[in-house]
Amino acid sequence: MRLVVISLAMLLAWPVAGQKSKKSVEILPVETSGGITYSLPRTGIRVKVTATRTDFVAGPYALYAESLLGIQKAGLQSRVTWNIDDIELGTFAEPDPDQRYQSGNLSAALLQLTPDGCLAAINAPEQPTLGQELVSNTFVLPAPKEIPAFTRLTNNAELTGRAPLEQRATAAAVAILKARQSRLDIVTGMLDEFHPDGEAYEQSLEELRHIEKSNLKLFTGITEHTTYTFYYDFIPAAAGAKGEVIFRFDESLGFLPKTDFSGKPVMIDVEPVSTVAPGPATSLSAPAAGNTSGGNPAVSPSGSNLYCRQPAPAEVRITRELTPIATGRLPIAQMGAVTPVPEGLLNGNYAILFWPETGAIKSVTKNQ
């Protein structure tokens, strides 16, 4: 009986011991006195590069192309070459870590934010807000579906792979010349026997073209082209950027990360061209950049300040080996100024929309 009592006491004590071993979870209060925290966007530059990769497999009879067929400069070595075809400049937006504020006494119900927390609208009709499309790069290129190779080295059954290379090349050249002559004879009507209908006539010409083309590749080689698209993102500082490497490129190796010194650098320059001073506005009601502690960075007497951006245009230049290969002018948010939204527009009578890429005011509409 004593043993049973001891066991019951242990069972009653076990949950208590288990509870003591668990860590206590502290629920922190949510601070709402300063209003809703929001960010202003900063502008990034997205460089879209379209390029072509060319795979060339040299023909086994390339050495005899000129002497047997008169083809000059036939490629003697297989190679892979890359060429940059086109460059496009675009922009994207992300929250600026140095421009975070709180909405103060303004009703939180009036604010609309983007999925990443930037100010999107004030007192505007509800609109679906989609996140930015994810763009990713990969440097692991897919393998070709079929690797170019030569399997038919001659159409002469008497010549095998053990025959001298020059002799096999001569047989292939003879097949090419015979196919050309036969096509000429058919077209000019010099054959004694004519085909009974047009379909057979076309089939004969197509077969002769195939013989010529398949044997000609043995001298000129096989060339395949594949097009690729790469994206590179760059976020310029408020003061601009000079000679920043965005990727490296080699005509044989293709596109490489900027840390791979096997290729030559492709650089970007971003230079402000506006007289608007970057950074926060200098008025008394302007905020202190990045200060979100202790309520609003700066508030008007009514405590309802909100801030937006006035972007500045910038000249963007992409260079490769000191040669410009793309230029453009884009509005950059962080190169402009931070300004307060007029308080007269924050009384609930107006709907305000902001450009998501720059944080500038897009439209102001008076509600009916």
Image (tube, rainbow, N blue to C red):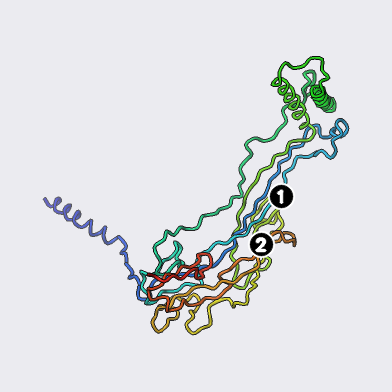
Of tags 2 and 1, the one toward the viewer is 1
Residue at 79% from the left image edge and 18% from the top image edge: 158
Q: Is residue 140 left or right of residue 360?
A: right
Quarter placement of the C terminus: bottom left
- Mark 1, other Cα within 10 Å: few <14 / some 14–19 / many ≥20: some
Residue shown at the point (73%, 27%) measured from the top left: 210
Label placed on residue 245: 2
Relative horizontal placement of residue 246, taking residue 360 as reference (left or right): right
> Residue 97, how many percent across, how many down?
50, 69
Dot 2, how many residues are within 10 Å of its Cα: few (below 14), some (14-19), or many (20+)?
A: some
Work out whether 106 lies above or below 205. below
Residue 30 placement, left or right of 252: left
Q: Position of residue 61 (x, y in %)?
A: 81, 32
Image spot of residue 310 (x, y percent): 54, 73
- Most extreme residue toward the front is 368
Q: In which quarter of the view is residue 181 placed?
A: top right
- Say the numbered circle drawn on residue 83: 1
Q: Position of residue 311 (x, y in %)?
A: 56, 71
Judged left or right of residue 164, residue 120 is left
**Is residue 183 at all visible to an observer of this figure?**
yes
User: Which amino acid, by three-letter code, is at mark 2?
Assistant: Val
Give the residue type that dot 1 points to. Answer: Asn
Q: Nearer the viewer, residue 120 or 143?
A: 120
Q: Residue furthest top?
A: 193
Q: The residue tagged with tag 1: helix, strand or loop?
A: strand
Q: Which mark is residue 31?
A: none
> Could you tell me if residue 164 is visible in this image?
no
Label 2: which secondary element = strand
Contact between labelled residues 1 and 2, with CB atoms less than 8 Å apart: no
Query: Does 48 sit above or below residue 216?
Result: below
